[in-house]
Image (tube, coloured by chain):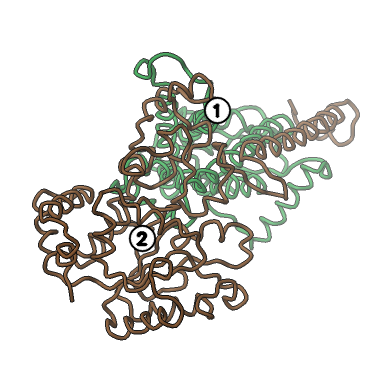
Chain colours: A brown, B green
Amino acid sequence: MDTFFDVLRRQGISRRSFVKFCSLTATSLGLGAGFSARMAHAMETKPRIPVLWLHGLECTCCSESFIRSAHPLAKDVVLSMLSLDYDDTLMAAAGFQAEAILDQTMKEYKGKYIVAVEGNPPLGEDGNYCMVGGRPFVDRLKEVCEDAMAVISWGACASWGCVQAAKPNPTKATPVHEVIRNKPIIKVPGCPPIAEVMTGVVSYILTFDRLPELDRMGRPKMFYSQRIHDKCYRRPHFDAGQFVEAWDDENARKGHCLYKMGCRGPTTYNACSTVRWNGGVSFPIQSGHGCIGCSEPDFWDNGPFYQRLSNIHPFMVEGTADSVGAKVAGGVGVAIAAHAAMSAVRQAQRAAPGSSSSSSKGDSK
Amino acid sequence: MANPSTTLPGVPDATGTEPHREGGGSVYVYQIPIRLWHWATVAAISTLALTGYFIGSPLPSVGGEASDSFLFGYIRSAHFIAGYVLAIGLVARTWWALVGNVHARQIYTVPVRDPKFLDELWWQVRWYSFLASEPRKHVGHNPLARLTMFFLFLQTALFLSVTGLALYSEGEGIESWQYKAFGWVFSLFGSSQRVHTLHHVGMWVMLLFVMTHVYAAIREDIMGRASILSTMISGWRNFRDTRE
């Protein structure tokens, strides 16, 4: 089987460019200086890991992001190095021919391939809401994952459920880790995830033959251990108390903090404020729009996006914790006032001379 | 319910002498740590509610250079400090429940199977519904107050402390002891934003407790048969009559 380097050489990529890519990837993974050599060595000597890329309920934005990985070499690098044996969106083959590749890889590389899942399986109506190759996607997912080495959950869909799992979730769309329970699963959430994060994760697995260190939620620590907010370049305005109060106001032009406009940066774990998007050009906050928290679980149900406080729905009404809380507190306040008024009447009756109920009382103040 | 006033060695009496009044006698109920904790918690909750509200709905934007001002930072700092006062206070209070007098553990349990408790609870409900002509005598909390303390105060304070420490751990980083100890909160509730929302709802529940607690304390102090407000200052419960 070809090594990654063999493939690159065949494509006419110089060793110089290859080494550049290795150092860039090592740096973006937060590894030390010695690791770029180790990475180059791994890519020159190791056989490419077969990857089966499955698509369930999704919008293909993960694939779109992935193939736009910023470094000039990245798409060649990753597509070649992965030995992407099956990806029904990208592959040339179709129909029975395509499905045959899937079966072949599963047989030949039993226990050695990686399943990358984009999208998730709907479990409603026996999985019939998502049919791939004439069968429910959930069946195929289980089948392919059975002999996999590891599973990568690409994007918010596979990791958390995303929009199709938002309330009321009519198709019962379910994240991958709730269906596949006996395999190591690495979540790379985001809608879509950042391209360099995706390629970075894959490069790490290939180089070190193991999954990167994961956090409590199963996300790679190197990209998801801090919030957007922790590295946001507008953070000084947050601490100072300088906020955008309305779209296009003076503060928006000055680039103040978007917290009051509903920015989810303080509650979102992702690398947008450091890695950024489109080759490091920008990210939502830099473009003047708050973060919507697309890499967080249930972010569709924690809206509205342009309001700091999420809406809650107690007693069939909709409002923020403040608007609902104030109404309830007002109601309790009125009840207390009414009770106090009745108590005052009762106290006056008891204190009245000759009243039978208070005659035996001692001093009642 | 006869209880020795100060039974613990090394714990000084509030006044040294019994401030005996005319009436039904006095019992030393709230030891010094309880009273200190009570008022520290009052200060903490007031600060937390106010700063917490402004963290959710910030004050109008300040002008000038970002480096000239740290308003939101100070508001958040005050919230964090008061939060630690509440949380550490809760731990200290729980320790005192174990070593303090019998009244110190009252709010930690609800004897739902004790017929006497249920009987007195029913009586207290009738008293608040203007159906009983007078309340019964209680050295510590009345049964309804005890229920409220246990469910509305203790559980809410615990919930706010745990979710608060979890949210605080996000700023401290996932390697911090706070995250290691309280990171499970995010696994339980899903996302950070959801925990923020629930923490905020908890504040309103606490506010409902404060409203009913203050009202009931003032009302009982006026209409009941024993001192309430002064008891949380002096520690002594003064009864106004000698009847059962």
Query: Where residue A357 sits in the image (x, y, percent)?
Result: 86, 36
Q: Residue at x 39, y 51 (%)?
A: B182
B158 left or right, relative to B215: left
| Crowd band around label 1 with a 10 angstrom C-alpha radius: few (<14), some (14–19), many (20+) | few
Write down the quadrant of residue B8 in the picture: top left
Task: Name the quarter where the C terminus of chain A is drawn.
Answer: top right
Query: Where residue B86 sits in the image (x, y, percent)?
Result: 45, 37
B20 left or right, relative to B244: left
Q: Secondary structure at mark 1?
A: loop
Check disc 2 and report the residue beneath it. Answer: A218
Query: Where residue A193 sits in the image (x, y, percent)?
Result: 39, 53
Chain containing the residue with disc 2: A
* Gap between marks 2 and 1 measured at Cα: 36 Å
Query: Where residue A124 sits in the image (x, y, percent)?
Result: 60, 72
B242 left or right, relative to B19: right
Report whether mark 2 lies on the same chain as mark 1: yes
| Crowd band around label 2 with a 10 angstrom C-alpha radius: few (<14), some (14–19), many (20+) | some
Does label 2 or label 1 sit earlier along the sequence? 2
Camera-side residue of B238 and B121 = B121
Check disc 1 and report the residue beneath it. Answer: A247
Q: Residue at x 52, y 27 (%)?
A: B58
Look at label 2 and name its amino acid.
Gly
Chain containing the residue with disc 1: A
Look at label 1 and name its amino acid.
Trp
Task: Name the quarter where the N terminus of chain A is drawn.
Answer: bottom left
Q: Eyeballing the image, is A166 above or below A284? A: below
Camera-side residue of B110 and A151 = A151
